[in-house]
Amino acid sequence: MVPLLVFILDVPIHLAAGASIVAVVATSSVSASVYVRDEITNMRLGMFLEMATTLGAVTGASIMVGISESVLRIIFALSLLYAAVIMWYQMRNTGRSWLPMENDWMANKLNLGSDYYDSARDETIAYGVSRSLPTFIISYIAGVISGLLGIGGGGVKVPAMNVISSVPMKAAVATSNFMIGVTASASALVYIRNGFCDGFITAPVVLGTLIGSFIGAKVALRVRGVVLKRIFIIILLILGVRMLASGVGLL
């Protein structure tokens, strides 16, 4: 949403981020409800990681005010490209959307492993959560990026859960959606307080993304995880390259 507002409508990135972060709160509620209803969301893992993400979101939103637009664009681009490369590398080496792993010691204590019924594969997928602590730390970084750039942070959290903690792609997307609403709410307050939420821009953004997120969540349930991952990588690459070129003055 932020790149679309910046490139198509020529909205300043601070205002685009403000509109996006408010929309994220609304759309997360819609799509998360679909995933929770179908029991794909890992609630325990989401609440565990959200402790770090919320703290990061407040940090990022607080320092956003003093950063120039070109720097924000470059940071945004690098975060998207990094996530895309990590996910592509893992999928190229394995040919799968995730690698089954056992719970690590922290996941065992917190009972973070889970399972869900995959309608696309017509089977129940059980999985453990590995390397919980690194994913917790990356979730803080995702929160900082979310607050800094006005995004949900899914571009960082989904790859972290999927590649580092070996959570299936669908469960990672669903759990990220569940977390995003809380993360965005924390940083949205800072954006509103600093006057970066323009109602004329924010209202149609929220309405459009509400409709899109509901349709997207319905479609995602019927798509195989590896296909979902490929789509995710392509979108990250396109937006990342476009934003980087803009940040360094090529566009």
Image (cartoon, rainbow, N blue to C red):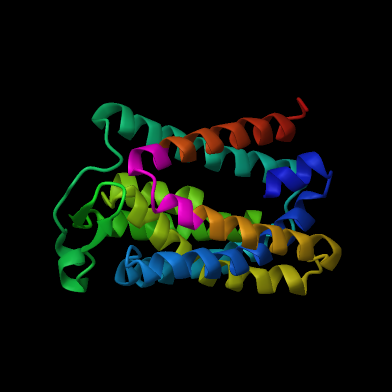
Q: Nearer the viewer, residue 226 or 79?
A: 226
Q: Residue at x 47, y 56 (%)?
A: 218
| Total numbered circles | 0
Q: Residue at x 74, y 41 (%)?
A: 70
Q: Magenta segment, which residues?
A: 217-229
Position of 113 relative to 100 (above/below): below
| Left or right of residue 188, residue 130 in this image | left
Query: Where residue 140 sits in the image (x, y, percent)?
Result: 45, 60
Q: Nearer the viewer, residue 124 or 44?
A: 124
Query: Where residue 233 sits in the image (x, y, percent)?
Result: 47, 36
Whether residue 48 is visible to the viewer of this picture, yes or no, is yes
Q: Nearer the viewer, residue 227 or 11?
A: 227
Whether residue 65 is visible to the viewer of this picture, yes or no, is no
| Left or right of residue 142, residue 96 in this image | left
Query: Where residue 37 sits in the image (x, y, percent)?
Result: 38, 71
| Left or right of residue 136, residue 201 in this image | right
Q: Principal SS element in the magenta part?
A: helix
| Left or right of residue 219, residue 162 in this image | left
Residue 197, magenta (yes or no):
no
Q: Residue at x 19, y 70 (%)?
A: 111
Query: Where residue 244 sits in the image (x, y, percent)?
Result: 66, 33
**Quadrant in the rendering for residue 90:** top left
Query: Which quadrant of the rendered structure holds the C terminus?
Result: top right
**Quadrant in the rendering for residue 17:** bottom right
Position of 96 relative to 135 (above/below): above
Q: Residue at x 44, y 32 (%)?
A: 85
Q: Nearer the viewer, residue 226 or 81?
A: 226
